[in-house]
Amino acid sequence: MLARHAAPQDPIAATRVDALDWAGVRKHLDAYGYAIIPGLLGAQACRDLANDYGNDTLYRSRVVMARHGFGLGEYQYFRYPLPAPVQALRDTLYPHLATVANDWNASLGIDVRYPAVHANFLTRCHEAGQRRPTPLLLQYGAGDYNCLHQDLYGEHVFPLQAVILLSEPGADFSGGEFVLTEQRPRMQSRVEVVPLRQGDGVVFAVQHRPAKGTRGPYRVTMRHGVSRLLGGRRYALGVLFHDAA
């Protein structure tokens, strides 16, 4: 049933993802709830995706953030079949992140486990009525920003997601930093500003991550957003692994 949604994998992206230092990615994810992956997409692939923002045939819906109190700017959700680079990133990142997700859930006493193959997880989503694809392309202009939020679209939520910056800071735009906050119990929020260049990806916790405490692991709440763009235009690709109800 899922076969009709699938686009061919991009073998270049698959090779690049599988060759990553996943031990280093895992170490940073466990320590901070996020990890930067430099050069996840090449410059031409970034430009091609950004240039396709105006191609309405690729998308199922458009969201203008100001109408919903989400911030300023807009984004569009892709429809199935996904563009080949987006499908490849979803398929190749997921198996590596599923191991992290399963370990995180085990440490927090959460019973949910994730299959090794992304298509099998999508079957779980679709059987629960979560059938709408969630990868999205975001567009920001001067003065735009994205409020802190969590991307939750139904009962089944994969605990990690990725954002790839498609524009070049300093050349295409200024400001517009990707930011993360974590809220520990009975403590004020901590903020991380994540420096990205064109093509860099950041993998991060969707909602919660485990942190080490004196009495064992405990749950930290994570949110993410984008600071105000000072000038230019900024495009980013969001890759989520669960579909939406």
Image: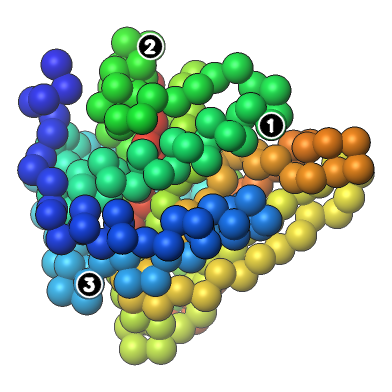
Which amino acid type corresponds to the residue marked 1 in the rendered image?
A: Ser
Horizontal relation, residue 132 to residue 48: left or right: right
Mark 3 sits on what residue? 42
SS class, disc 2:
loop
Q: Earlier in the sequence, mark 2 or mark 1?
A: 1
SS class, disc 3:
loop
Q: Is residue 37 above or below residue 172?
A: above
Identify which residue, 5 or 35, lies in the foreground: 35
Point out the frontmost of discs 1 and 3: 1
Q: Quadrant of residue 16?
A: bottom left
Dot 2 surroundings within 10 Å: few (below 14), some, or many (20 or more)?
Answer: some
Q: Quadrant of residue 119?
A: top left
Q: Residue at x 85, y 43 (%)?
A: 213
Q: Residue at x 64, y 22 (%)?
A: 110
Residue 234, can we see it?
no
Q: Which mark is residue 107?
A: 1
Dot 1 surroundings within 10 Å: few (below 14), some, or many (20 or more)?
Answer: some
Q: Earlier in the sequence, mark 1 or mark 3?
A: 3
Q: Is residue 224 above or below residue 49?
A: above
Q: Are marks 1 and 3 in contact (CB under 8 Å)?
A: no
Which amino acid type corresponds to the residue marked 3 in the rendered image?
A: Gly
Instruction: Name the quadrant of the N terminus.
Output: top left
Q: Earlier in the sequence, mark 2 or mark 3?
A: 3
Instruction: List x then y, in percent, for residue 178.
Output: 52, 66
Mark 2 sits on what residue? 128
Identify which residue, 96 or 8, lies in the foreground: 96
